Image (spheres, rainbow, N blue to C red):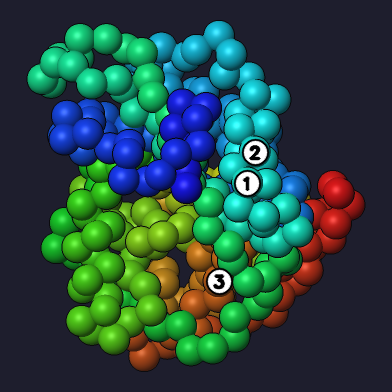
Amino acid sequence: MINFNGNIVEEKQVISINNRGLNYGDALFETIKVSHGKLLFWEAHYFRLMASMRILRMEIPMNFTMEFLQEQILELISYKSLLDSSVRVKLFVNREEGGLYLPDTNNIDYLITVKPIESDFYLLNDATYQVDLFKDYYVSPSLLSTLKTNNKALHVVGSIYAQENKLQNALILNTNKQVVEALNGNLFLVKDQVIKTPPLTDGCLKGIMRKQIIELVKQLPDYRIEEASISPFELQKADELFITNVIVGLQPITQYRKKSFKTEVSKALLQKLNVKIRLAN
């Protein structure tokens, strides 16, 4: 069961062949972790969604408040008897049917899905996690590339490339040959006392967990954060590399080509992240 425009219905009753997200990629989504009825980083998700809808010139309904959408999410979680669990929520917004490239309307439909996940807090995965560069296609930096849209062909092909090469993930480059992000999250690089992450102007996703980690790094007395371009040559010189997203939290990279990495900073940040979540409850 899913929530479609405020109604809990069967999944098969929803998507039309004329859906604009299906036909033109005219859609946005937010992936949200909800733990025991608590929407983690909900304010950041909400404001990113509102900003993204404005950029795509979608009409924001008057009732699309933080409180309304939270109620809609929790209603579906409750219906599926998952209020005492941790779940992955996908909030999907697309322009209503009608038109070709030029839409007939800027009004929107919304759809919410829920799937249970195992862990309430973020756990460190210290298993082998090997990555390499995906260089078949490149991100073209722009405001659109920072949005969480369903235009993810590059990430799909990149994921197949990673699987074929027995990698756990791959790193994406932009058209300036700078490292932008991983296939499923933002990238951070640790070298000496500096922790770097690519700036939004390089084309990376405006990640919710990226923002949280930037704030947490500022609490580490021995490190400073830099939003600066990362060249492929820097990867093998790094002390640590890690990936962030709202579902896994923080994923250390253990190997890039022949270089192996430490995980001390990753562990410290993950502890601070879990403390922040507990204090927010």
Residue drawn at the location 51% of the way across and 37% of the way down: 8
Residue drawn at the location 61% of the way across and 57% of the way down: 87
What is the CA distance from the residue labelled 3 to the residue labelled 2?
31 Å
Is label 2 in a helix, a strand or a loop? helix
Mark nearer the viewer, 1 or 3: 1
Q: Write down the residue under mark 2.
A: 75
Is label 1 in a helix, a strand or a loop? helix
Neighbourhood count class around disc 3 (C-alpha, 10 Å): few under 14, some 14–19, many 20 upward: many
Residue 252 higher or lower than 141, as above or below? below
What is the CA distance from the residue labelled 2 to the residue labelled 1?
6 Å
What is the CA distance from the residue labelled 1 to the residue labelled 3?
32 Å
Q: Write down the residue under mark 1.
A: 79
Residue 123 higher or lower than 86, as above or below? below
Residue drawn at the location 32% of the way across and 32% of the way down: 27
Q: Write down the residue under mark 3.
A: 251
Is label 3 in a helix, a strand or a loop? strand
Horizontally, residue 76 falls left or right of residue 163, namely right
Hey, what amino acid is under mark 2?
A: Glu
Looking at marks 3 and 2 on the same chain, the residue that comes earlier in the sequence is marked by 2
- Write down the quadrant of residue 217 in the picture: bottom right
Horizontally, residue 270 falls left or right of residue 261, namely right
Neighbourhood count class around disc 1 (C-alpha, 10 Å): few under 14, some 14–19, many 20 upward: few
